[in-house]
Image (cartoon, helix red, strand yellow):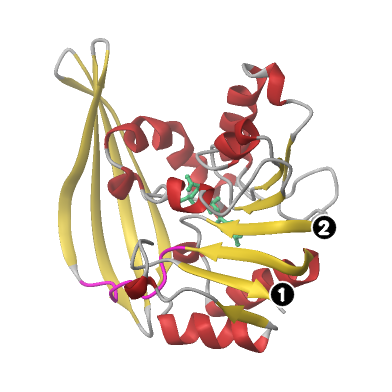
Amino acid sequence: MQAANDSRTEADDPYAVMSYYYDTFAAVSSTAAQTAPHASAFLSFAKPGDRVVDLGAGTGSTALPLAELGCTVHAAEPSRSMRSVLLSKLAARPQLHPRLTVTDLDVPFPEADYAMLAGVLQCLSPHRCRELLTRVVDCLRPGGLVALDMVGHEPVCSSPLTRVAEARAGRCGYEMWVESAPLAGPAGRQRIEYRQYLDGKLLTSEAVVRSVYVHTRQEVHAELTGLGFTVLVPPETSDLPVDFVIARRD
Ligand SMILES: C[S@@+](CC[C@H](N)C(=O)[O-])C[C@H]1O[C@@H](n2cnc3c(N)ncnc32)[C@H](O)[C@@H]1O
């Protein structure tokens, strides 16, 4: 476990920049912001009283509604900046304080009925993915569920800088621009640029470069099966989004 003094720098964390804009763009385009486009799919597997671990909980797009539903939620999020946004939202919801715990990723997870990775797979190298799923199997009770999205995404292609979303707040306009390039293997490099305007004039522009990973459905199923899960619902025969996987711990 990491010591109380967090030695990671903002440079290690692309979400140190992204957190500032995350909810602004999530509100107008969940796809562009790369927030969980399927929050309702994740919520549909939870019921009041469930103990849930939300891995990579971000600014709380699933953790807050789960707590509102009556679940006891452990939101584990490695980015300090993302956690700070979530904590601010939590501060305004005192009724949720007894049920929503927010920590870094490095603390032990409590026993859970349900674990989720919403919008997170893109951030995980194959090694990190196995590490995280191993921690999931260790915290889930037998019969507990794990849900993931972003399974089987297309390989990263080369694409020029393109505006993918815009938003307004008062006199300010915001734009999100993305360019990407493939890397060796099923991974890519993505540069995300955020521009802020005041009365139409460019005020600030800042960019972040990060690696993104692609995990095929076969790889994710094999990983889960190897760790002692039974994959439950093939999305083609259900109402679930096509990039969604749900599995039960044996
Ligand atoms: C696209 S955001 C999704 C946030 C939230 N789950 C949602 O759906 O809005 C991806 C999140 O994964 C987190 N993340 C990055 N690396 C991670 C890792 N190794 N394990 C867990 N989460 C990670 C990021 O900090 C970020 O908050």
Q: Nearer the viewer, residue 52 or 2?
A: 52
Q: Residue at x 85, y 50 (%)?
A: 3
- For the stretch drawn in magenta, the main secondary structure is loop
Q: Which residues are magenta?
A: 149-157
Q: Residue at x 34, y 45 (%)?
A: 33
Tag 2 or tag 1, which sits nearer the N-term?
Answer: 2
- Whether 74 is drawn above or below 195: the answer is below
Drawn side of residue 42 relative to residue 240, left or right:
right
Circle 2 Cα neighbour tier, 10 Å, few/some/many (<14 / 14–19 / ≥20)? some
- Whether 49 is drawn above or below 203: the answer is below
Provide residue 89's location: percent of width, then percent of height.
58, 24
Q: Nearer the viewer, residue 94 or 77?
A: 94
- Whether 125 is drawn above or below 211: the answer is below
Drawn side of residue 153 relative to residue 164, left or right:
right
Q: Is residue 130 magenta?
A: no
Q: Residue at x 15, y 60 (%)?
A: 160
Q: Which mark is residue 111?
A: 2
Quadrant in the picture for the N terminus:
bottom right
Provide residue 148's location: percent of width, then percent of height.
51, 64
Q: Which mark is residue 134?
A: 1
Residue type pointed to by label 1: Thr
Question: Which label lies toward us, 1 or 2?
Answer: 2
* Spatial CA span between label 1 and label 2: 14 Å
The answer to whether the residue bearing label 2 lies less than 8 angstroms from the nearest atom of ligand 1 is: no
- Residue 217, quarter of picture: bottom left
Provide residue 45's location: percent of width, then percent of height.
56, 54
Quadrant in the picture for the C terminus:
bottom right
- Whether 204 is drawn above or below 30: the answer is above
- Residue 153, quarter of picture: bottom left
Circle 1 Cα neighbour tier, 10 Å, few/some/many (<14 / 14–19 / ≥20)? some
Residue type pointed to by label 2: Glu
Drawn side of residue 233 relative to residue 52, left or right:
left
